Image (cartoon, coloured by chain):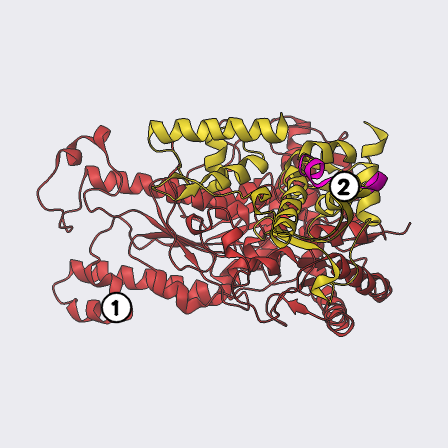
Chain colours: A red, B yellow
Amino acid sequence: MKRIYLDYAATTPVDPRVAKAMEPFWNENFGNAGGLYEEGRRAKEALTKSRETITKLIGAKPDEIIFTSGGTESDNLAVFGVANAALQVVARAVVSPSSKSDFGTPKKSDFFPGDLVVGQPSGVKPHIIITKFEHHAVLTPCEQLAKEDFDVTFLDVGENGIVDPEDVRKALRPETVLVSIMYANNEIGTIQPIAEVGKVVKDFRMAKEQILKDLASPTGVSTRNFSAEKYPCLSKFDTETFGKQYPYFHTDACQAAGYLDLNVNNLGVDLMTVNASKIYGPKGVGFLYKRSGVKIKPQIIGGGQEMRMRSGTENIPLIVGLAKAFELAQAEKDSETARLVPLRDYFISEVMKRIPKVVLNGHTTKRLPNNINVSILDIEGEALVLYLDSKGISFSTGSACTSESLDPSHVILALGKPYEFAHSSMRFTLGRSTTKTDIDYVMGELPKTVEWLRIVSPISVDMNASGMSHPEAFAGENLRVKAKSKSYKPDVLLK
Amino acid sequence: MDDTKKDIDVINQYTGEKWYYTDIVKDHFFHPRNLLMEKPKDENEFDARGMVGSPACGDMMEMWMKVEGEKVKELKWKTFGCASAIAATSIYSVMLTENGGLTLDEAMKVRPQDVMKRLGGLPNRKIHCSVLADKAFQKTANDYFRKTGQNSRIVVEGARVIDARLNITDKDIEEAVLEGAANLEEVQQKLKVGVGASDEVKTDIESLIRFYREKYYG
């Protein structure tokens, strides 16, 4: 049976041109890039070339690219790397308080680093801002940090699934060390205003810098007031602990890499995650862009490869594949966008036309050209996936039944939709091989399958529902992190 | 690899873990038996009705029953849920009505394990789906007992608060065990709270975990 693969956001096949570029590096040029001899030099050359290809495309410098094992590692390195480096900054500040800071009477901990309590004596924890619908590779590390020495703000994303830069501005604090917002959401494809958030972050850093400058001169009060008016939280800011370099701004651009401009200067990002497996490259490789001067603590240490930021023998074939895939993806992004947008919109309008009780998740146009995410109410995702799988169609669902934790999609819940919408959410993502004929085939199978599963189903959800239909049936509901609440309180597990 | 377990597999995007369904599960999923095509317009068309639901797990089940004498004459159903939930309800309805039907007392003794066995097994984390069928039936039977004035036969499962500090009930523990938690730590992870702060509560929870493990997996 012909398969119609519509899960390109999960992963893509390797482009033959990419496979060809990788070919010589399995056997022929197998050397360790650290070797001084011929084989090593050839590996090193391929590594350097790959790095240059990427830096040119994103407007970076060669020493700003760290090759990793993929999106998750890059995200982890960005979050934990910044967080752990920030803790060192705090620790240093406590050991030798800045003369400008009002720390009051020195405490024992000021002199005995062994007794350090993070955030003391100022009582401030380093702060991180992310959105509620970040990929788990960012979300889970941040949830873990929230249980440790960090304050984490989980921003709402509105019912369209787009974060408001103004919300980021309001969430900023003097001690904010990291803002991490994905470029395009992996489930609903909504494109985030990264360049605007980049400006907000930069503006805030400039305000901090100005205040620190003013503190050094006796005439600077007025400027300080100006900054404090815009950022009330800075009215008492007077320490270099979380100085002008913070916050850093990270974006996970894995889903965006095939369709959007990834120039780091246009975006105003300090850190950016990209991987190969979403852009027709091999699995198991990605990179983290890290702007010069941004302080992160490496998470994998050893031989000191990748400017000491990520040890381990460089995986030359995969890195070459990543660079080639990224080059092709960026070269073809405009033509692919032009081809896929009409197909995407055709898919959406056909689904809406042919099937009653369907809700589009995420903004209608500010979404990736290949993403369709709809809640087909009253039926459950896994059942539809398996029925259509038997007809040769592959796609994915946000239903709990297919998740490890048996929790439904946090992305759909972050839109403020009830659980039933998440269980019924279906993601179809198009790719280079998708044609209109494929979509027409899907439209031949999808409506009748939905009709059948609705006969099987006992429920009938209100299209305009905004709350859970059966909150009482939800085990421990009031104790979990609520999708719609503003603040996040980490739960403390027993040892 | 057992051939019967090959065909449908759902691969978890985060863990890569595979979920296999047996041919029997597939058969009942694609060709459900005793499905009620349309909800009855007349309430008296059936002798009893019951419904259970857990939107958190994405499963909802509704049953309709006709009783003749003491026997389950007809058992119709509708299910919102994954393949195993649909297949489990389907085979459960067959088990209760085949060969002239079980008596109500016999029917109430059909355990989730028996459903699993008839299905040729379910992936571990899908066990809660097969439990829903017998819970839905208990509610349906209760409805029948109530309507026929046999109130003494009604079985009510009441929730008992175990951890007063967090308002965690035995039902929460049961749910967690059904979702695969095998010890206190895993129950805490499932419920996402630190239940069992005091030793007394901890012991209570642990004995409940043993009880439900025994009940559903023993």
Residue A193 image point, x, y percent: 51, 66
Q: Does B167 appear above or below A187?
A: above
Left or right of A13: which side holds A285? left
Main secondary structure found in the magenta portion: helix
Chain at numbered mark 2? B
Q: Secondary structure at mark 1?
A: helix
Residue B75 screen position, x and y as percent: 76, 49
B43 inside magenta stretch: no
Where residue A119 sits: x, y (%)? 25, 43
Query: Circle 2 is placed at which residue position?
Result: B96
- Where on the picture, by quarter, is residue B177? top right
Query: Looking at the picture, which amino acid does disc 2 mark?
Result: Leu
Tell me which segment is drawn in magenta.
B98-109
**A483 and A2: which is toward the camera:** A483
Image spot of residue A215 (x, y percent): 17, 59
Label 1: how many Cα within 10 Å (few below 14, some 14–19, many 20+): many
